[in-house]
């Protein structure tokens, strides 16, 4: 109790890796925050990319298709965890901005315990729905056992993923994106090495790449926990003091659950899309897996600026600096849309050699280029749709982005697939990819209109 009281009374000093988001120039600080975040996200994607490259090169197209088929169900859980970690980011960042050190201490210990409990629950849920999800996406029987094996191993590692994502959110909330980058660098090198050993030396195929991914995540998560346990108060994590503080649990869940549901809605719609993709056969499935992996590298750029918007907006809300919120929003959009579009065009321009890394089959590369055209060339639209909700959540509005995503990115996308794509003249795979562009635009526009309304409310309440 005395320690908690002391935390509330002593002014917090910025660590050498922290960023004060409530004063000073925004551009340099946002880039300092986002660039390590981009690199961290790229390394996370390398986990999956390494799986695809190694399994595609050394285990065959069937194994490559199996890993791709399992990606959507696994991503649904990952999106849920990332969404929930947004609640941690918002709550901790507001406490940091306001200088409330007792709140920081309580939020950190609540967050890690929630990650452990939630992760364990999700293991059992994931294993229970593993095969039904694969059958829902019409995964061919010839690759279903391989896909289920890969998927189940990753589901068992969910608690590790949960703790890592919540721990990373704590670092982001204080502006520290450098150390998570270092942790992922270590884990990324290990992941690639284990992939090669398990698949080439021990011939474990999909089992090997799944084990390599989980073991590398164990390393990055361990580094996160060890670092937090050695921090100075109020950021120091002490496992014996883990508990659920109601005053922190409720806002974490209130902000995190809608964000998690939003992420899952994308994944649910992607499951439906995957079922349409699977109907085109193994070649299109393999091409989609490879192209999707490349798109992920571009998406991580815009997602990094979306997360920047959450952290910067949350800290300034906590500090009462409402005058900086619109500037943060505009700068996030400018950087996210501009850089995201540039990366999308670069990915498409170098698409053929990049796809050749995943597969040497000319038919796979040809189909992969079709997907890259529809997904990467108009990537600024996707960036716009994803960055606006970041500002909304930083201001404390988390319900509407979820509703808009459910309607726009899920319901409308499914309606497109079940109506437009069933027309004889629209039976090509191009019309499946077009569903993304149409729903990105509609959802982004709805999010922006609501942002204008929410910002006026924030300013009025501050007056």
Image (tube, grey):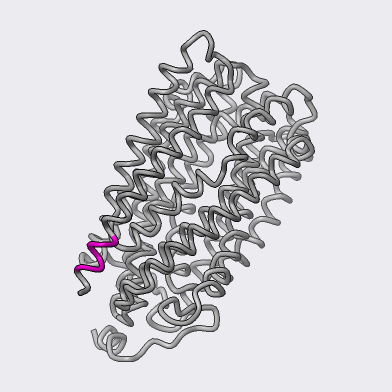
Q: Nearer the viewer, residue 1 or 38?
A: 38
Q: Residue 371: x percent and y percent?
A: 62, 30
Q: Residue 181: x percent and y percent?
A: 60, 65
Image vertical order of residue 420 relative to residue 313, above or below = above
Q: Nearer the viewer, residue 147 or 295?
A: 295
Q: Nearer the viewer, residue 209 or 174?
A: 174
| Magenta part, dominant SS | helix
Q: Residue 300: x percent and y percent?
A: 56, 52
Image vertical order of residue 93 relative to residue 67, above or below = below
Residue at 45% across, 54% down? 387
Instruction: Give the side of residue 137 with respect to residue 260, left or right.
Output: right
Residue 461 sits in quarter: bottom left
Query: Magenta segment, which residues?
Result: 455-460
- Total labels: the figure holds 0
Is residue 105 something one can see in this rendering? Answer: no
Q: Residue 326: x percent and y percent?
A: 38, 66
Residue 293 sits in quarter: top right
User: Which quarter of the rendering shows the N terminus?
Assistant: bottom left
Residue at 45% across, 80% down? 20
Whether the magenta-drawn stretch holds residue 459 is answered as: yes
């Amino acid at each position: 109790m005395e320690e908690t009281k002391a935390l509330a009374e002593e002014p917090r000093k910025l660590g050498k890796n922290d960023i004060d988001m409530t004063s000073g120039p925004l551009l340099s600080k946002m880039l300092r925050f986002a660039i390590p975040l981009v690199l961290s996200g790229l390394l996370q994607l390398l986990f999956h990319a390494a799986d695809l490259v190694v399994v595609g090169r050394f285990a065959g197209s069937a194994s490559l298709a199996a890993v791709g088929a399992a990606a959507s169900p696994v991503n649904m859980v990952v999106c849920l965890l990332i969404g929930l970690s947004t609640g941690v980011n918002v709550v901790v960042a507001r406490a940091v901005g306001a200088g409330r050190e007792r709140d920081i201490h309580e939020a950190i210990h609540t967050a890690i315990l929630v990650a452990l409990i939630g992760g364990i629950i999700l293991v059992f849920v994931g294993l229970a729905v593993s095969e039904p999800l694969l059958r829902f996406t019409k995964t061919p029987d010839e690759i279903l056992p391989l896909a289920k094996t890969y998927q189940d191993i990753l589901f068992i590692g969910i608690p590790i993923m949960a703790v890592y994502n919540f721990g990373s959110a704590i670092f982001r909330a204080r502006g520290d994106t450098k150390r998570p980058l270092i942790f992922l660098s270590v884990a990324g090198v290990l992941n690639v090495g284990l992939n090669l050993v398990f698949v080439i030396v021990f011939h474990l195929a999909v089992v090997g790449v799944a084990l390599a991914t989980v073991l590398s995540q164990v390393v990055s998560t361990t580094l996160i926990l060890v670092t937090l346990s050695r921090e100075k108060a109020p950021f120091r994590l002490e496992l014996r003091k883990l508990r659920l503080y109601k005053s922190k649990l409720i806002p974490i869940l209130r902000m995190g659950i809608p964000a998690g549901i939003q992420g899952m809605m994308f994944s649910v719609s992607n499951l439906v899309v995957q079922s349409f993709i699977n109907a085109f056969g193994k070649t299109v499935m393999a091409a989609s897996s490879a192209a999707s992996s490349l798109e992920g590298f571009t998406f991580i750029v815009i997602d990094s600026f979306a997360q920047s918007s959450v952290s910067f907006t949350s800290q300034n809300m906590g500090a009462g600096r409402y005058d900086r919120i619109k500037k943060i929003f505009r700068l996030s959009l400018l950087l996210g849309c501009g850089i995201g579009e540039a990366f999308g065009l670069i990915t498409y321009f170098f698409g053929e050699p990049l796809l050749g890394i995943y597969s040497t089959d000319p038919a796979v590369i040809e189909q992969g280029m079709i997907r890259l055209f529809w997904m990467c060339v108009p990537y600024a639209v996707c960036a716009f749709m994803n960055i606006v909700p970041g500002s909304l959540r930083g201001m404390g509005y988390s319900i509407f982005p979820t509703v808009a995503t459910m309607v726009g990115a899920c319901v409308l996308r499914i309606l497109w697939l079940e109506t437009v794509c069933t027309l004889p003249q629209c039976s090509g795979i191009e019309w499946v990819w077009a569903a993304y562009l149409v729903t990105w635009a509609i959802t982004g526009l709805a999010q922006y209109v609501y942002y204008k309304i929410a910002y006026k409310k924030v300013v009025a309440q501050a007056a």
